[in-house]
Amino acid sequence: MDFSALLSKSASQFSGNVAVWCDGREQTYTELYERGSRLANALTDIGLNKGDRVALLSSNAFETVELIAGCALGGFVRAGLYAHETGEVNSYLLELVDARVLIVNADLYDTIAPQLPGLEKLERVLVFGGEAPEGATSYEDALAVASPKAPVVETRPDDIHVIRFSAGTTGRPKGIVHTIERWLANDDEYRWVTPQIDERDAYLAAGQLTHAASLWLWPVLQVGGRIIVMPSFEPGRALELIEQQRATCTLVVPTMISALLAHPDIDTRDLSSMRCLNYAASPIAERTLERALDKFGPVLYQLYAQSECITVTMLQPHQHTDKYLRSVGRATPNTEITIVDADGNTLQAGEVGEIAVSAPGQMNELWKNPEANAERHLSDGRLLTRDMGYLDEDGFLFLADRKEDMIISGGYNIWPAELENAVASHEAVREVCVVGVPHEKWGETPRAFVVLEPGVEVTEEELIEVTRAAVGSVKKITSVEFVDTLPKSGVGKILRREVKKGHWEGQDRAIGGA
Protein backbone atom coordinates (compact mmCIF):
# COMPACT_ATOMS: atom_id res chain seq x y z
CA MET A 1 0.00 0.00 0.00
CA ASP A 2 1.18 3.51 -0.79
CA PHE A 3 -0.09 6.81 0.62
CA SER A 4 -2.65 7.32 -2.16
CA ALA A 5 -4.20 3.92 -1.46
CA LEU A 6 -4.15 4.66 2.27
CA LEU A 7 -6.02 7.95 1.85
CA SER A 8 -8.50 6.45 -0.61
CA LYS A 9 -9.33 3.57 1.73
CA SER A 10 -9.73 5.85 4.75
CA ALA A 11 -11.96 8.24 2.79
CA SER A 12 -14.17 5.27 1.89
CA GLN A 13 -14.28 3.58 5.29
CA PHE A 14 -14.36 6.67 7.52
CA SER A 15 -15.96 9.23 5.21
CA GLY A 16 -17.90 11.10 7.89
CA ASN A 17 -15.29 10.88 10.62
CA VAL A 18 -13.49 14.08 11.55
CA ALA A 19 -9.94 13.79 10.24
CA VAL A 20 -8.70 17.24 11.29
CA TRP A 21 -9.78 19.61 14.05
CA CYS A 22 -8.11 22.98 14.52
CA ASP A 23 -9.45 25.83 16.66
CA GLY A 24 -13.06 24.80 16.11
CA ARG A 25 -12.77 24.05 12.38
CA GLU A 26 -13.34 20.48 11.26
CA GLN A 27 -12.52 18.49 8.16
CA THR A 28 -13.95 15.04 7.47
CA TYR A 29 -12.09 12.27 5.69
CA THR A 30 -14.16 12.90 2.56
CA GLU A 31 -13.23 16.58 2.64
CA LEU A 32 -9.57 15.83 3.32
CA TYR A 33 -9.41 13.45 0.36
CA GLU A 34 -11.11 15.91 -1.95
CA ARG A 35 -8.99 18.88 -0.90
CA GLY A 36 -5.81 16.80 -1.11
CA SER A 37 -6.81 15.66 -4.58
CA ARG A 38 -7.49 19.22 -5.67
CA LEU A 39 -4.04 20.26 -4.47
CA ALA A 40 -2.37 17.36 -6.29
CA ASN A 41 -4.21 18.27 -9.49
CA ALA A 42 -3.46 21.98 -9.08
CA LEU A 43 0.26 21.20 -8.85
CA THR A 44 0.01 18.94 -11.88
CA ASP A 45 -1.78 21.71 -13.78
CA ILE A 46 1.14 24.02 -13.01
CA GLY A 47 3.37 21.51 -14.74
CA LEU A 48 4.84 19.47 -11.90
CA ASN A 49 5.66 15.80 -12.39
CA LYS A 50 5.95 12.91 -9.99
CA GLY A 51 9.12 13.30 -7.95
CA ASP A 52 9.29 17.09 -8.20
CA ARG A 53 9.93 18.83 -4.89
CA VAL A 54 7.25 20.93 -3.20
CA ALA A 55 8.36 23.00 -0.21
CA LEU A 56 5.99 23.84 2.63
CA LEU A 57 6.58 26.84 4.89
CA SER A 58 4.07 27.13 7.72
CA SER A 59 3.53 26.67 11.39
CA ASN A 60 0.81 24.15 12.21
CA ALA A 61 -2.43 25.20 10.53
CA PHE A 62 -5.82 23.78 9.64
CA GLU A 63 -4.49 23.19 6.12
CA THR A 64 -1.28 21.39 7.14
CA VAL A 65 -2.66 17.85 6.92
CA GLU A 66 -4.23 18.42 3.50
CA LEU A 67 -0.93 19.89 2.26
CA ILE A 68 0.86 16.71 3.29
CA ALA A 69 -1.92 14.56 1.81
CA GLY A 70 -1.94 16.49 -1.47
CA CYS A 71 1.80 16.09 -2.00
CA ALA A 72 1.47 12.34 -1.39
CA LEU A 73 -1.52 11.97 -3.73
CA GLY A 74 0.39 13.66 -6.54
CA GLY A 75 3.57 11.68 -5.98
CA PHE A 76 5.48 14.87 -5.21
CA VAL A 77 8.38 15.03 -2.79
CA ARG A 78 7.50 17.13 0.24
CA ALA A 79 10.21 19.29 1.78
CA GLY A 80 9.11 20.91 5.03
CA LEU A 81 10.86 24.19 5.77
CA TYR A 82 11.01 25.55 9.31
CA ALA A 83 8.79 28.43 10.35
CA HIS A 84 11.32 29.50 13.00
CA GLU A 85 14.22 29.78 10.55
CA THR A 86 15.39 32.90 8.75
CA GLY A 87 14.56 33.65 5.15
CA GLU A 88 18.22 33.09 4.26
CA VAL A 89 18.21 29.56 5.68
CA ASN A 90 14.90 28.62 4.08
CA SER A 91 15.96 30.01 0.69
CA TYR A 92 19.11 27.87 0.94
CA LEU A 93 16.92 24.81 1.57
CA LEU A 94 14.64 25.68 -1.33
CA GLU A 95 17.65 25.89 -3.59
CA LEU A 96 19.20 22.73 -2.14
CA VAL A 97 16.23 20.56 -3.16
CA ASP A 98 15.47 22.44 -6.40
CA ALA A 99 11.92 23.11 -5.25
CA ARG A 100 9.63 24.09 -8.11
CA VAL A 101 6.75 25.20 -5.89
CA LEU A 102 6.59 26.81 -2.46
CA ILE A 103 3.37 26.68 -0.45
CA VAL A 104 3.53 29.25 2.34
CA ASN A 105 1.28 30.54 5.07
CA ALA A 106 0.42 34.20 4.51
CA ASP A 107 1.77 35.03 7.98
CA LEU A 108 5.25 33.87 6.92
CA TYR A 109 5.34 35.17 3.36
CA ASP A 110 7.27 38.33 4.28
CA THR A 111 10.04 36.27 5.91
CA ILE A 112 10.92 34.60 2.61
CA ALA A 113 9.77 37.21 0.06
CA PRO A 114 13.13 39.08 -0.26
CA GLN A 115 14.89 35.83 -1.24
CA LEU A 116 12.35 34.60 -3.80
CA PRO A 117 13.67 36.52 -6.86
CA GLY A 118 17.04 34.78 -6.55
CA LEU A 119 15.60 31.25 -6.67
CA GLU A 120 15.88 30.28 -10.33
CA LYS A 121 14.25 26.83 -10.03
CA LEU A 122 11.24 28.10 -8.08
CA GLU A 123 8.34 28.56 -10.51
CA ARG A 124 5.30 29.25 -8.35
CA VAL A 125 4.42 30.39 -4.83
CA LEU A 126 1.01 29.43 -3.42
CA VAL A 127 -0.18 31.41 -0.39
CA PHE A 128 -2.83 30.14 2.03
CA GLY A 129 -4.35 31.53 5.19
CA GLY A 130 -4.69 35.05 3.79
CA GLU A 131 -4.46 37.12 0.63
CA ALA A 132 -1.75 36.31 -1.89
CA PRO A 133 0.62 39.25 -2.51
CA GLU A 134 1.42 40.37 -6.03
CA GLY A 135 3.47 37.76 -7.85
CA ALA A 136 2.08 34.89 -5.77
CA THR A 137 -0.96 32.66 -6.35
CA SER A 138 -3.89 32.21 -4.01
CA TYR A 139 -3.96 28.65 -2.69
CA GLU A 140 -7.74 28.68 -2.51
CA ASP A 141 -8.07 30.00 -6.06
CA ALA A 142 -5.77 27.26 -7.34
CA LEU A 143 -7.78 24.56 -5.59
CA ALA A 144 -11.12 26.01 -6.74
CA VAL A 145 -10.35 25.42 -10.42
CA ALA A 146 -8.62 22.04 -9.94
CA SER A 147 -10.36 18.70 -10.32
CA PRO A 148 -11.61 17.07 -7.08
CA LYS A 149 -11.02 13.63 -8.56
CA ALA A 150 -8.02 11.80 -7.16
CA PRO A 151 -5.18 11.67 -9.69
CA VAL A 152 -3.87 8.36 -10.92
CA VAL A 153 -0.19 8.30 -10.10
CA GLU A 154 1.83 5.12 -10.10
CA THR A 155 4.43 5.19 -7.37
CA ARG A 156 7.14 2.70 -6.52
CA PRO A 157 8.35 1.75 -3.04
CA ASP A 158 11.73 3.38 -3.70
CA ASP A 159 10.24 6.71 -4.82
CA ILE A 160 11.14 9.55 -2.46
CA HIS A 161 8.34 10.48 -0.08
CA VAL A 162 9.90 13.32 1.91
CA ILE A 163 13.11 15.27 2.38
CA ARG A 164 13.52 16.35 5.97
CA PHE A 165 16.18 18.78 7.10
CA SER A 166 18.68 18.42 9.91
CA ALA A 167 18.73 21.11 12.58
CA GLY A 168 21.87 22.67 11.15
CA THR A 169 23.35 23.27 14.60
CA THR A 170 26.83 22.20 13.47
CA GLY A 171 26.72 23.79 10.03
CA ARG A 172 24.39 24.03 7.05
CA PRO A 173 21.22 21.90 7.34
CA LYS A 174 21.31 18.70 5.31
CA GLY A 175 18.49 17.10 3.35
CA ILE A 176 17.51 13.70 4.77
CA VAL A 177 15.83 11.45 2.20
CA HIS A 178 13.10 8.92 3.08
CA THR A 179 11.36 6.76 0.49
CA ILE A 180 7.72 5.66 0.53
CA GLU A 181 8.75 2.15 1.52
CA ARG A 182 10.89 3.21 4.45
CA TRP A 183 8.44 5.77 5.77
CA LEU A 184 5.61 3.22 5.77
CA ALA A 185 7.92 0.61 7.32
CA ASN A 186 8.76 3.08 10.07
CA ASP A 187 5.06 3.73 10.68
CA ASP A 188 4.60 0.01 11.23
CA GLU A 189 7.63 -0.13 13.51
CA TYR A 190 6.33 2.78 15.58
CA ARG A 191 2.97 1.09 16.01
CA TRP A 192 4.67 -2.01 17.41
CA VAL A 193 5.83 -0.01 20.44
CA THR A 194 2.89 2.34 21.04
CA PRO A 195 -0.69 1.52 22.01
CA GLN A 196 -2.99 0.06 19.38
CA ILE A 197 -5.11 2.87 17.93
CA ASP A 198 -8.39 2.95 16.04
CA GLU A 199 -11.00 5.46 14.85
CA ARG A 200 -11.87 6.42 18.43
CA ASP A 201 -8.39 7.84 19.02
CA ALA A 202 -7.44 11.51 18.85
CA TYR A 203 -3.88 12.69 18.33
CA LEU A 204 -2.90 16.06 19.78
CA ALA A 205 -0.40 17.58 17.33
CA ALA A 206 1.26 19.85 19.88
CA GLY A 207 4.55 19.98 17.98
CA GLN A 208 5.27 20.95 14.41
CA LEU A 209 3.83 18.57 11.83
CA THR A 210 6.80 19.39 9.62
CA HIS A 211 9.02 17.74 12.22
CA ALA A 212 8.67 14.84 14.67
CA ALA A 213 4.95 15.44 15.27
CA SER A 214 4.30 13.95 11.82
CA LEU A 215 5.24 10.54 13.22
CA TRP A 216 1.63 9.94 14.29
CA LEU A 217 0.01 11.49 11.21
CA TRP A 218 -0.21 8.57 8.80
CA PRO A 219 -0.97 5.90 11.44
CA VAL A 220 -3.90 8.01 12.72
CA LEU A 221 -5.19 8.67 9.19
CA GLN A 222 -4.91 4.98 8.38
CA VAL A 223 -7.33 3.98 11.17
CA GLY A 224 -9.78 6.87 10.83
CA GLY A 225 -8.75 8.75 13.96
CA ARG A 226 -8.75 12.47 14.58
CA ILE A 227 -5.80 14.88 14.41
CA ILE A 228 -6.12 17.85 16.75
CA VAL A 229 -3.85 20.55 15.35
CA MET A 230 -2.37 23.17 17.67
CA PRO A 231 -1.14 26.17 15.64
CA SER A 232 1.47 26.73 18.35
CA PHE A 233 2.19 25.05 21.65
CA GLU A 234 0.82 26.74 24.74
CA PRO A 235 0.69 24.55 27.87
CA GLY A 236 -2.64 25.80 29.20
CA ARG A 237 -4.27 25.34 25.81
CA ALA A 238 -2.78 21.87 25.47
CA LEU A 239 -4.22 20.80 28.82
CA GLU A 240 -7.57 22.27 27.80
CA LEU A 241 -7.59 20.35 24.51
CA ILE A 242 -6.66 17.06 26.18
CA GLU A 243 -9.71 17.46 28.40
CA GLN A 244 -12.20 18.90 25.89
CA GLN A 245 -11.18 16.91 22.81
CA ARG A 246 -10.40 13.74 24.81
CA ALA A 247 -6.97 13.41 23.23
CA THR A 248 -5.53 9.93 23.61
CA CYS A 249 -1.98 10.38 22.33
CA THR A 250 0.60 13.07 21.72
CA LEU A 251 4.28 13.51 20.98
CA VAL A 252 6.24 16.22 22.79
CA VAL A 253 9.75 17.24 23.78
CA PRO A 254 10.81 17.34 27.45
CA THR A 255 10.64 21.13 27.70
CA MET A 256 6.96 20.88 26.76
CA ILE A 257 6.36 18.36 29.54
CA SER A 258 8.03 20.75 31.99
CA ALA A 259 5.76 23.57 30.79
CA LEU A 260 2.65 21.40 31.22
CA LEU A 261 3.68 20.44 34.75
CA ALA A 262 4.40 24.06 35.67
CA HIS A 263 0.98 25.29 34.50
CA PRO A 264 -1.61 25.83 37.27
CA ASP A 265 -4.29 23.93 35.29
CA ILE A 266 -2.36 20.67 35.59
CA ASP A 267 -4.23 19.91 38.83
CA THR A 268 -7.70 20.81 37.58
CA ARG A 269 -7.92 19.37 34.06
CA ASP A 270 -9.22 15.87 33.37
CA LEU A 271 -6.31 14.11 31.65
CA SER A 272 -7.68 10.58 31.95
CA SER A 273 -8.21 10.15 28.19
CA MET A 274 -4.46 10.18 27.52
CA ARG A 275 -3.12 6.71 26.71
CA CYS A 276 0.26 7.62 25.26
CA LEU A 277 2.37 10.61 26.23
CA ASN A 278 5.33 10.04 23.96
CA TYR A 279 8.37 12.22 24.58
CA ALA A 280 11.57 12.46 22.56
CA ALA A 281 14.26 14.67 21.01
CA SER A 282 16.35 15.57 24.06
CA PRO A 283 17.29 14.33 27.55
CA ILE A 284 14.73 14.63 30.33
CA ALA A 285 15.39 15.10 34.03
CA GLU A 286 14.42 12.24 36.32
CA ARG A 287 12.56 14.68 38.58
CA THR A 288 10.45 15.82 35.62
CA LEU A 289 9.68 12.21 34.72
CA GLU A 290 8.59 11.42 38.27
CA ARG A 291 6.24 14.43 38.33
CA ALA A 292 4.84 13.53 34.91
CA LEU A 293 4.13 9.98 36.05
CA ASP A 294 2.30 11.38 39.04
CA LYS A 295 0.12 13.72 36.97
CA PHE A 296 -0.52 11.66 33.84
CA GLY A 297 -0.21 8.13 35.15
CA PRO A 298 1.60 5.17 33.55
CA VAL A 299 1.24 6.45 29.98
CA LEU A 300 4.76 7.75 29.35
CA TYR A 301 6.70 6.36 26.39
CA GLN A 302 10.22 7.60 25.70
CA LEU A 303 11.29 7.48 22.05
CA TYR A 304 14.90 7.67 20.95
CA ALA A 305 15.06 8.73 17.32
CA GLN A 306 16.52 11.25 14.94
CA SER A 307 15.56 12.54 11.52
CA GLU A 308 18.09 10.17 9.99
CA CYS A 309 16.53 7.17 11.74
CA ILE A 310 13.06 7.87 12.99
CA THR A 311 12.35 5.00 15.40
CA VAL A 312 15.26 3.39 17.24
CA THR A 313 14.21 2.56 20.82
CA MET A 314 11.22 2.94 23.09
CA LEU A 315 11.08 2.94 26.89
CA GLN A 316 7.67 1.48 27.72
CA PRO A 317 5.52 2.65 30.66
CA HIS A 318 6.28 -0.46 32.72
CA GLN A 319 10.00 0.18 32.21
CA HIS A 320 9.86 3.63 33.83
CA THR A 321 11.44 2.24 36.98
CA ASP A 322 14.43 3.30 39.03
CA LYS A 323 16.64 0.83 37.16
CA TYR A 324 15.83 2.08 33.67
CA LEU A 325 14.61 5.63 34.18
CA ARG A 326 17.85 7.04 32.76
CA SER A 327 17.77 4.76 29.72
CA VAL A 328 15.90 5.33 26.46
CA GLY A 329 14.61 1.78 26.32
CA ARG A 330 15.27 -1.19 24.11
CA ALA A 331 15.55 -1.37 20.34
CA THR A 332 12.19 -1.64 18.59
CA PRO A 333 11.39 -5.15 17.23
CA ASN A 334 13.02 -4.79 13.80
CA THR A 335 15.85 -2.47 14.81
CA GLU A 336 19.39 -3.56 15.61
CA ILE A 337 21.71 -1.43 17.76
CA THR A 338 25.44 -1.82 18.15
CA ILE A 339 27.96 0.34 19.98
CA VAL A 340 31.13 0.92 18.00
CA ASP A 341 34.50 2.54 18.53
CA ALA A 342 36.15 5.07 16.22
CA ASP A 343 37.18 2.26 13.84
CA GLY A 344 33.72 0.71 13.67
CA ASN A 345 34.53 -2.22 15.95
CA THR A 346 31.69 -3.49 18.14
CA LEU A 347 32.06 -2.78 21.85
CA GLN A 348 30.87 -4.86 24.77
CA ALA A 349 27.97 -4.17 27.13
CA GLY A 350 28.72 -1.21 29.38
CA GLU A 351 31.34 0.31 27.07
CA VAL A 352 30.63 3.81 25.75
CA GLY A 353 30.94 4.35 22.02
CA GLU A 354 28.99 5.66 19.05
CA ILE A 355 25.51 4.26 18.53
CA ALA A 356 25.10 2.50 15.18
CA VAL A 357 21.70 1.32 14.00
CA SER A 358 20.01 -0.70 11.29
CA ALA A 359 16.28 0.07 11.28
CA PRO A 360 13.15 0.17 9.09
CA GLY A 361 12.97 3.96 9.47
CA GLN A 362 16.58 4.54 8.49
CA MET A 363 17.17 7.28 5.92
CA ASN A 364 18.03 6.31 2.37
CA GLU A 365 20.66 9.00 1.90
CA LEU A 366 21.63 12.62 2.44
CA TRP A 367 20.40 14.68 -0.49
CA LYS A 368 23.17 15.66 -2.94
CA ASN A 369 25.86 15.02 -0.32
CA PRO A 370 27.66 11.73 -1.02
CA GLU A 371 30.63 12.62 1.19
CA ALA A 372 28.53 13.31 4.28
CA ASN A 373 26.39 10.27 3.46
CA ALA A 374 29.46 8.04 3.43
CA GLU A 375 30.62 9.48 6.76
CA ARG A 376 27.29 8.54 8.35
CA HIS A 377 27.36 4.87 7.30
CA LEU A 378 29.50 1.87 8.07
CA SER A 379 30.48 -0.43 5.21
CA ASP A 380 27.59 -2.81 5.96
CA GLY A 381 24.99 -0.03 5.77
CA ARG A 382 24.55 0.65 9.47
CA LEU A 383 23.86 4.29 10.27
CA LEU A 384 26.21 6.15 12.59
CA THR A 385 23.98 8.33 14.75
CA ARG A 386 26.72 10.68 16.07
CA ASP A 387 25.26 9.95 19.52
CA MET A 388 27.36 8.27 22.18
CA GLY A 389 26.05 5.70 24.60
CA TYR A 390 26.20 2.14 25.85
CA LEU A 391 24.01 -0.96 26.04
CA ASP A 392 23.55 -2.77 29.33
CA GLU A 393 23.44 -6.53 29.67
CA ASP A 394 19.65 -6.54 29.07
CA GLY A 395 19.83 -4.52 25.86
CA PHE A 396 18.69 -1.20 27.28
CA LEU A 397 20.33 1.81 25.66
CA PHE A 398 21.80 4.59 27.80
CA LEU A 399 22.83 7.83 26.11
CA ALA A 400 26.00 9.69 26.98
CA ASP A 401 25.68 12.68 24.64
CA ARG A 402 26.23 13.91 21.12
CA LYS A 403 29.70 13.01 19.88
CA GLU A 404 30.41 16.69 19.21
CA ASP A 405 29.31 17.76 22.70
CA MET A 406 31.87 15.82 24.71
CA ILE A 407 33.90 18.07 27.02
CA ILE A 408 37.59 17.14 27.25
CA SER A 409 38.93 18.61 30.47
CA GLY A 410 42.46 17.79 31.54
CA GLY A 411 42.35 14.63 29.42
CA TYR A 412 39.06 13.40 30.92
CA ASN A 413 35.99 12.83 28.72
CA ILE A 414 32.94 14.46 30.29
CA TRP A 415 29.41 14.07 28.96
CA PRO A 416 27.17 17.14 29.53
CA ALA A 417 23.94 15.13 29.70
CA GLU A 418 25.17 13.28 32.79
CA LEU A 419 25.88 16.57 34.55
CA GLU A 420 22.60 18.09 33.37
CA ASN A 421 20.67 15.20 34.86
CA ALA A 422 22.42 15.72 38.19
CA VAL A 423 21.78 19.48 38.24
CA ALA A 424 18.15 19.02 37.17
CA SER A 425 17.56 16.71 40.13
CA HIS A 426 17.63 19.75 42.41
CA GLU A 427 14.13 21.04 43.11
CA ALA A 428 15.14 24.65 42.41
CA VAL A 429 16.15 23.93 38.81
CA ARG A 430 13.66 24.28 35.97
CA GLU A 431 16.06 23.99 33.02
CA VAL A 432 19.79 23.45 32.62
CA CYS A 433 22.37 23.27 29.87
CA VAL A 434 25.99 22.28 30.49
CA VAL A 435 28.76 23.22 28.05
CA GLY A 436 32.51 23.33 28.09
CA VAL A 437 34.04 26.79 28.50
CA PRO A 438 37.73 27.71 28.09
CA HIS A 439 40.06 27.03 31.02
CA GLU A 440 43.71 28.08 31.12
CA LYS A 441 44.94 24.92 32.82
CA TRP A 442 42.49 22.18 31.76
CA GLY A 443 41.68 23.40 28.24
CA GLU A 444 37.97 23.50 28.99
CA THR A 445 35.76 22.92 31.98
CA PRO A 446 32.02 22.23 32.47
CA ARG A 447 29.78 25.21 33.24
CA ALA A 448 26.05 24.92 33.97
CA PHE A 449 23.61 27.52 32.67
CA VAL A 450 20.56 27.28 34.89
CA VAL A 451 16.98 28.58 34.83
CA LEU A 452 15.46 28.46 38.31
CA GLU A 453 11.92 27.66 39.33
CA PRO A 454 10.01 30.85 40.23
CA GLY A 455 10.52 31.90 43.85
CA VAL A 456 13.11 29.19 44.59
CA GLU A 457 16.78 29.81 45.25
CA VAL A 458 19.94 27.74 45.20
CA THR A 459 23.60 28.72 45.30
CA GLU A 460 26.33 27.93 42.82
CA GLU A 461 28.18 25.97 45.49
CA GLU A 462 25.13 23.80 46.19
CA LEU A 463 24.76 22.80 42.53
CA ILE A 464 28.46 22.09 42.18
CA GLU A 465 28.20 19.82 45.20
CA VAL A 466 25.22 18.00 43.64
CA THR A 467 27.33 17.12 40.60
CA ARG A 468 30.33 16.21 42.76
CA ALA A 469 28.16 13.67 44.57
CA ALA A 470 26.84 12.29 41.29
CA VAL A 471 29.98 12.00 39.15
CA GLY A 472 32.93 12.76 41.44
CA SER A 473 35.27 15.70 41.84
CA VAL A 474 37.07 15.25 38.50
CA LYS A 475 33.97 15.54 36.28
CA LYS A 476 31.81 17.89 38.32
CA ILE A 477 30.71 21.29 37.01
CA THR A 478 33.08 24.03 38.12
CA SER A 479 30.81 27.05 37.71
CA VAL A 480 27.16 28.04 37.35
CA GLU A 481 25.59 30.91 35.46
CA PHE A 482 21.99 31.68 36.38
CA VAL A 483 19.97 32.87 33.37
CA ASP A 484 16.35 33.85 32.75
CA THR A 485 15.95 31.69 29.64
CA LEU A 486 17.84 29.20 27.51
CA PRO A 487 17.82 29.41 23.71
CA LYS A 488 15.57 26.82 22.06
CA SER A 489 14.89 25.62 18.56
CA GLY A 490 11.48 25.91 16.96
CA VAL A 491 10.66 22.42 18.22
CA GLY A 492 11.63 23.19 21.82
CA LYS A 493 15.11 21.68 22.04
CA ILE A 494 17.70 23.62 24.02
CA LEU A 495 20.35 24.88 21.61
CA ARG A 496 23.66 23.98 23.19
CA ARG A 497 25.53 25.66 20.34
CA GLU A 498 23.87 28.98 21.11
CA VAL A 499 24.75 28.65 24.79
CA LYS A 500 28.40 28.16 23.83
CA LYS A 501 28.49 31.28 21.67
CA GLY A 502 30.65 34.04 23.04
CA HIS A 503 32.79 31.69 25.12
CA TRP A 504 34.93 30.32 22.30
CA GLU A 505 35.44 33.34 20.03
CA GLY A 506 39.05 33.36 18.88
CA GLN A 507 39.64 29.93 20.45
CA ASP A 508 40.62 26.70 18.67
CA ARG A 509 37.75 24.62 20.10
CA ALA A 510 34.89 24.19 17.63
CA ILE A 511 31.34 25.05 18.60
CA GLY A 512 29.30 21.95 17.89
CA GLY A 513 26.34 20.02 19.14
CA ALA A 514 22.59 20.42 19.24
Image (tube, rainbow, N blue to C red):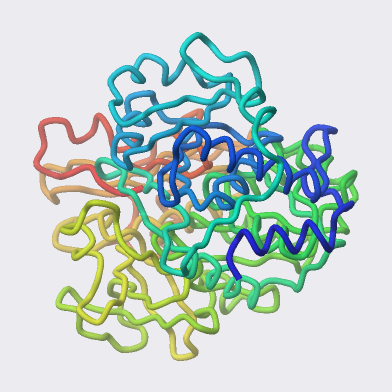
Residue at the location (62% across, 48% down)?
Answer: 69
Residue at the location (67% across, 50% down)?
Answer: 150
Quadrant of the rendered structure where residue 178 is? bottom left
Residue nearer the viewer, 161 or 423 = 161
Q: Where residue 472 sits: x, y (%)?
A: 34, 65
Residue at the location (38% across, 78% down)?
Answer: 358
Quadrant of the rendered structure where residue 406 is? bottom left
Residue nearer the viewer, 6 or 444 = 6
Residue nearer the viewer, 59 or 338 = 59
Q: Where residue 75 sits: x, y (%)?
A: 51, 53
Farthest top residue?
A: 134
| Location of the N terminus (image quadrant) | bottom right
Q: Where residue 118 sits: x, y (%)?
A: 28, 20
Would you say 223 lies left or right of 465 here? right
> Eyeballing the image, is 71 above or below 339?
above
Q: Where residue 94 sits: x, y (%)?
A: 35, 34
Would you say 372 lies left or right of 361 here? left
> Eyeballing the image, is 19 above or below 421?
above
Residue nearer the viewer, 379 or 271 = 379
> Eyeballing the image, is 445 above or below 406?
above
> Eyeballing the image, is 165 above or below 321?
above
Would you say 171 lies left or right of 371 here? right
How many marks the image carries: the answer is 0
Residue at the location (19% across, 55% down)?
Answer: 409
